[in-house]
Image (cartoon, rainbow, N blue to C red):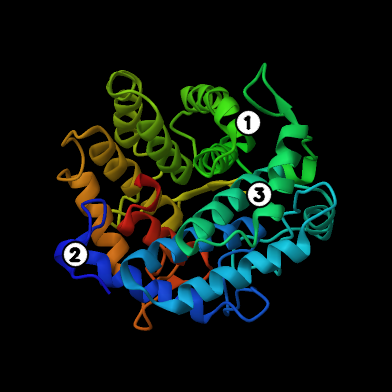
Amino acid sequence: MQNIEDIPSRVDHERYYSAIGVADFIAAHHDEEGTYNVNEPWGPEGEIYRAICVWVLRDAYKFSDKPEYLDKSRIILERFRKRQRPSGGWTLSLGSDGLKFKVTDDERRDTETLEDPVISGAVLKSIADYQLITGTKDSQDMGNKAFDSLMDLWNSDIGTINEYRDRHLSALRSNPDSYHFMILLGLNAWSDAGSSKAKEVLPQNIDFARKTFDNFDDKTMPLMVGYYVAVLTKFCSLEYSKRYIKPKLDAYMKSGLFGSNDIPGGYGHHDGLRGIVTDELHMRSGIGLANAMKSYDLNTGQNEYMKTKWYLDICTWIDSMKSNDGSYFEYQTTIDEKKYGKGSAGQYLPILWILGTLLK
């Protein structure tokens, strides 16, 4: 494990060991089939979550050298290999209902039969990240098929894929277009891994991401605000960040639509089925906004957010969600201030934020 003083500035040194502790939890709760097993998650686990777990386990390994992180990453990638469709893509495949977010039998069936192309983007990043750190090419063929599946759907006129929107799948997401940031991250990773075609289409997808962000408003899911600020401040100019991203982020924070009036730093959630929910304060939302502010400051070299009351209150709330076993709870109810849920999103998101995984 690296000495704390040798860890780069993108890492929150104060919370570094919390990130390693929750990485231990993620690794321990993926079985030998790559399935995540816990009691009482907030909602169903899906394949996107498995891909992001690889992102953070790989990043945690860079600093800790814990072999179990790479071992579980390998097992999860093998799970993707077994589940890859002949087209090269995957289905979302939602699991059992959680405590709060539940789907109908029709919705679950559609997630098991209809392909979800954004998963291909997430998996491409998982494969590229894993192969870069291990020096292996064991998953290259799987990645090539996934990339080809995206290119089969590519529309240069819009800068992203032509996506079939099933009413059941679309209903699960408050803003389906916003999930295409995973395609952008996958294309970037595949470009860095040597794909000339990915490098060619990447600027088109960055333009699509900018247009998607332009359409965000105060009702947009906080998690997506965080992802898009992280991505766009990385790929776009400082001038763009100052002129477009900062005013929108300021307006979003000042609107306070999701913020709790009773618990400082707690923010509600927006999902496709229930709309805006403010009696559940979510790690998805808190981490999303903390990541937005951290990403803006570190990617732009500006000192705008990380010393503000907004940021410090969210940090305090996130710290309060930590469990005694090294994991984090996913949400807190405002009526009784109790904390619930150990789903994987509640675990990988703190790592993304603490280690600055999307800032590298």
The residue closer to the viewer here, 97 or 60, is: 60
Categorize mark 2 by other alpha carbons within 10 Å: few (<14), some (14-19), many (20+).
few
Measuring from the top left, give residue 60's x and y in whole percent: 38, 66
Measuring from the top left, give residue 273's x and y in whole percent: 66, 48
46 with respect to 110 (left or right)? left
**Disc 3 to disc 1: CB gap under 8 Å:** no
Residue 12 to residue 67: above or below: above
Give the alpha-carbon distance from disc 2 to disc 3, as whole Å.
33 Å
The residue closer to the viewer here, 307 or 251, is: 307
Categorize mark 1 by other alpha carbons within 10 Å: few (<14), some (14-19), many (20+).
some
Measuring from the top left, give residue 246's x and y in whole percent: 29, 27
Q: Which mark is residue 197?
A: 1
Residue 331 to residue 262: above or below: below
Q: Which mark is residue 14?
A: 2
The kind of secondary structure element at disc 2 is helix
67 with respect to 94 (left or right)? left
Frontmost of labels 2 and 1 is 1
**Disc 2 to disc 1: CB gap under 8 Å:** no
Residue 302 to residue 56: above or below: above
**Residue 182 in view here:** yes
**Residue 267 in view here:** no
The residue closer to the viewer here, 276 or 49, is: 49
Which corner quadrant of the image does residue 29 belong to? Answer: bottom right
The residue closer to the viewer here, 332 or 261, is: 332
Which corner quadrant of the image does residue 266 belong to? Answer: bottom left
**Amino acid under disc 2:** Glu
Frontmost of labels 3 and 1 is 1
**Amino acid under disc 3:** Ile
Q: Which mark is residue 119?
A: 3
**Amino acid under disc 1:** Lys
Give the alpha-carbon distance from disc 3 to disc 1, as whole Å.
19 Å
The kind of secondary structure element at disc 3 is helix
